[in-house]
Image: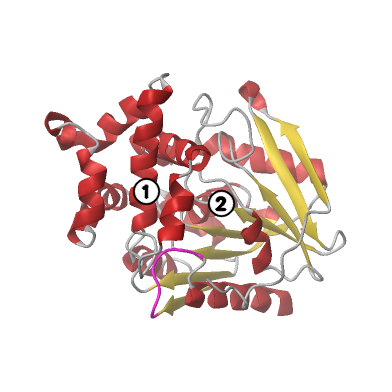
C-alpha cells in the first residue's frame, strides 16, 4: 500500500524502558524535534502495541512525538500480562511518563481504543491536554462490544464464522467468556490459536476492501497474544470505565479542541459512536471520510489524520 501522504520513515532519537507498578515495564520512545511541541500517540487494542509507521503521521521538524506501548502490549513487559492492567492503571502510567519526560502539556492522538484512553486521560487530567486527534471512536459501551462480538456477522459473515468456529458450539452463546478462558490458559497450544483467531477476525473487518497484509500483521503471534488477551480482559470488565461511561464526563473536556476522524464504513467502530461523541463535545470538529473503514492506514484516513494534526500545528 503506498503511503506517500505520510511523512518519511524516521528513527527515534531516544528510547527506554520505564518501571511501573506491579512488575510492569513500559517501552517508550521519542521521535522528531526534541524541542518541538509534544504529542502523545496512544495505540489501539487495548493490547495492540505501536509500530514504526505510527511515527509517520507527524512532521518530525515540528513535533516532539512520544510513543509508548501500554501495559502488556508490544515491547512492554511482561507481554499479555493482565495483573493490575486496567484503564485507571493506564491513565496513571501516562502521568508517570509525562513526569519522567518533563512535559507540562501535550496533544493526544489516538484511534479506536486509543481514542477511549485519550478521553479517559483527558477527563482525568484536562489541564495537561492541549487538544485531541481521535480516529475510529470507541467509547466502550455495551452495545459497541456486542457489535464486535456478534453484530459484525451481519457484514462479515465469513470472517465471523471463522471467529465463532474456534469455539465449540455449546459455548458460542458467550463468545467473550469462551475466548477469555482460552486466552488466559497457561498452555501456548491453547492460548495462541485462540489469539490468532480473535486477532485475524478483527484484522479482517478493519479495512474497507480486503487487505491480506492487515490480517497477516494482526495474526502474528506476538501481536495476536497481546491484542486478543488484553482486549478480551477489558471487554469482560466493561473497559474498566466509571459508571455512566465517558460521555458522562464530557464537561471536564468541553473547553479542549478536538479533531474526530471517522471512516463512513468503519465496521469495527461504527460511525454512530463518533457522531455521539461529536454531539457531546462543543469544540470537536468531525470529519467523515466517505470511502474508508476502520484502519488508520487506509488512504482517506491517513490524509485526514495528517491534515488534522497540521491544523493543530497552525493553532
Element marked by disc 2 = loop
Residue at mark 2 to residue at mark 1: CA–CA distance: 18 Å
Give residue 242's position: percent from left, percent from top.
43, 40
Vertical arrangement, residue 65 with respect to residue 291, above or below: above
Residue 260 on the magenta span: no
Q: Residue furthest right?
A: 35
Of marks 2 and 1, which one's residue comes earlier in the chain? 2
Point out the image quarter for the C terminus: bottom right
Q: Is residue 282 visible?
A: no
Q: Residue furthest top?
A: 186
Instruction: Give the main secondary structure of the magenta stretch.
Output: loop
Vertical arrangement, residue 53 with respect to residue 1, above or below: above
Please identify the quarter of the rendering in which residue 243 is found: top left
Vertical arrangement, residue 200 with respect to residue 299, above or below: above
Residue 43's label in the rendered image is 2
Residue 200's label in the rendered image is 1
Magenta-colored span: 290-296
Amino acid at each position: 500500500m503506498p503511503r506517500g501522504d505520510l511523512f518519511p520513515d524516521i528513527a527515534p532519537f531516544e528510547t527506554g524502558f520505564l518501571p511501573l507498578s506491579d512488575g510492569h515495564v513500559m517501552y517508550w520512545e521519542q521521535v522528531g524535534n526534541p524541542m518541538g511541541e509534544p504529542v502523545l500517540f496512544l495505540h489501539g487494542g487495548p493490547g495492540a502495541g505501536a509500530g514504526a509507521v505510527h511515527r509517520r503521521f507527524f512532521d518530525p521538524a515540528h513535533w516532539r512525538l512520544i510513543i509508548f506501548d501500554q501495559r502488556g502490549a508490544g515491547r512492554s513487559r511482561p507481554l499479555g500480562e493482565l495483573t493490575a492492567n486496567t484503564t485507571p492503571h493506564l491513565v496513571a502510567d501516562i502521568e508517570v511518563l509525562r513526569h519522567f519526560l518533563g512535559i507540562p502539556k501535550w496533544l493526544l492522538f489516538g484511534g479506536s481504543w486509543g481514542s477511549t484512553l485519550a478521553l479517559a486521560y483527558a477527563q482525568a487530567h484536562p489541564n495537561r491536554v492541549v487538544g485531541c486527534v481521535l480516529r475510529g471512536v470507541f467509547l466502550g459501551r455495551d452495545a459497541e462490544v456486542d457489535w464486535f462480538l456478534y453484530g459484525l456477522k451481519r457484514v462479515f459473515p465469513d470472517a465471523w464464522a471463522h471467529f465463532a468456529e474456534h469455539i465449540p458450539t455449546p459455548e458460542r452463546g458467550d463468545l467473550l467468556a469462551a475466548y477469555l478462558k482460552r486466552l488466559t490458559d497457561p498452555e501456548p497450544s491453547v492460548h495462541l490459536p485462540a489469539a490468532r483467531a480473535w486477532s485475524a477476525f478483527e484484522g479482517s473487518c478493519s479495512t474497507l476492501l480486503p487487505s491480506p497484509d492487515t490480517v497477516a500483521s494482526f495474526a502474528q503471534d506476538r501481536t495476536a497474544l497481546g491484542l486478543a488477551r488484553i482486549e478480551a480482559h477489558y471487554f469482560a470488565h466493561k473497559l474498566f470505565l466509571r459508571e455512566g461511561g465517558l460521555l458522562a464526563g464530557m464537561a471536564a473536556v468541553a473547553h479542549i479542541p478536538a479533531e474526530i476522524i471517522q471512516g463512513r464504513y468503519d465496521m469495527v467502530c461504527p460511525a454512530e459512536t463518533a457522531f455521539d461523541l461529536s454531539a457531546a463535545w462543543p469544540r470537536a470538529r468531525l470529519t467523515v471520510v466517505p470511502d474508508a473503514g476502520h484502519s488508520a492506514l487506509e488512504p482517506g484516513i491517513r490524509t485526514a489524520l495528517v491534515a488534522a494534526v497540521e491544523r493543530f500545528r497552525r493553532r
